[in-house]
Amino acid sequence: MLAPRIVSYGASVKGEDHKENEDSILVEDKLGLYAVADGVTMPYGGGPASRLAISSLRSLFKGDLAETILQVNTTVLDEKKKNPRIGSSTLTAAHLADGNVRIAHAGDSSAFLIRENAMILKTAPQNREGFLTNTIGEYFEGATLYSKEIKSGDYLILATDGVTAVLNHDEIADIVTKQKEPKRIVEYTLREIERRPRPYRDDRSMVVVRV
């Protein structure tokens, strides 16, 4: 049995209302590892936290996504003790292996699995009354885990809330269906968000993987 051919693309754009891009992404085809992290702006240190979460995920990952997320949170907490400028971050990561996708989710960055133009898996945001209830580096309650068999033609989408607060699920699925190629999907989506009026011009990040 041949391994599925993976085509992936990711990009992150600073929001006009931010001094720096507090989002970070990971695209590692050799590991089958993908992630988005959205640093929490208030009160401070979102950018450093998201970058540390992503770099720690990449360096610590040995195949067990659930265990790695715990280690990432510990790493961020340890570094916060040394550097008070580090804050907290969402983290949504996915691992493709053995015909399955495994997702670990903390915060309100999203993961979707699209098959034949329909979303067959989507993460639920972890927030209450506008406040995050689960983040890396603060209030961490453990990642919510998802697992799903993948098939040829599936699309895995990871996105921060700078994307999902502007485009709804149907619009994202429609863009995937029409644009088809991961690079075109990401670039079209980020342009479409920039074109639309929105009260808060947040950082926006997206990773698309086509199996």
Image: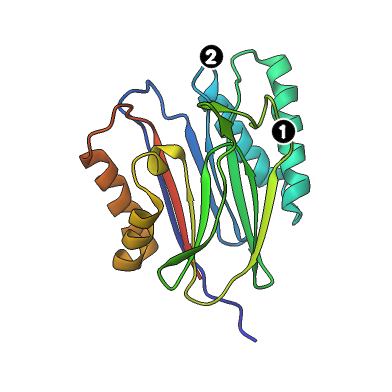
**Above/below status of 73 relative to 210:** above
Tell me residue 96's x, y (percent): 62, 63
Q: Quadrant of residue 102?
A: bottom right
Mark 2, other Cα within 10 Å: few <14 / some 14–19 / many ≥20: few
Residue in front for this viewpoint, 142 or 126? 126
**Vertical position of residue 85 compared to residue 28: above or below:** above
Nearest the viewer among 151 and 30 is 151
Residue 173 occupies quadrant? bottom left
Residue 156 on image: x %, y %:
50, 60
Left or right relative to 149: residue 20: left
At x 76%, y 54%, the residue is: 64
Residue type (three-letter) at the residue carrying disc 2? Pro
Q: Which callout, 2 or 1, points to the residue nearer the camera?
A: 2
Q: Residue at x 34, y 67 (%)?
A: 177
Q: Residue at x 55, y 41 (%)?
A: 125
Q: Position of residue 56 (x, y in %)?
A: 67, 38
How crowded pointer 1 is (Cα within 10 Å; few <14, some 14-19, many 20+) is rated as many
Q: CA distance from mark 2 to mark 1?
A: 18 Å
Q: Which mark is residue 73?
A: 1
Q: Amino acid at mark 1?
A: Asn
Q: Residue at position x 57%, y 32% from top?
A: 127
Label 1 sits on a secondary structure element that is: helix
Q: Disc 2 designates what residue? A: 43
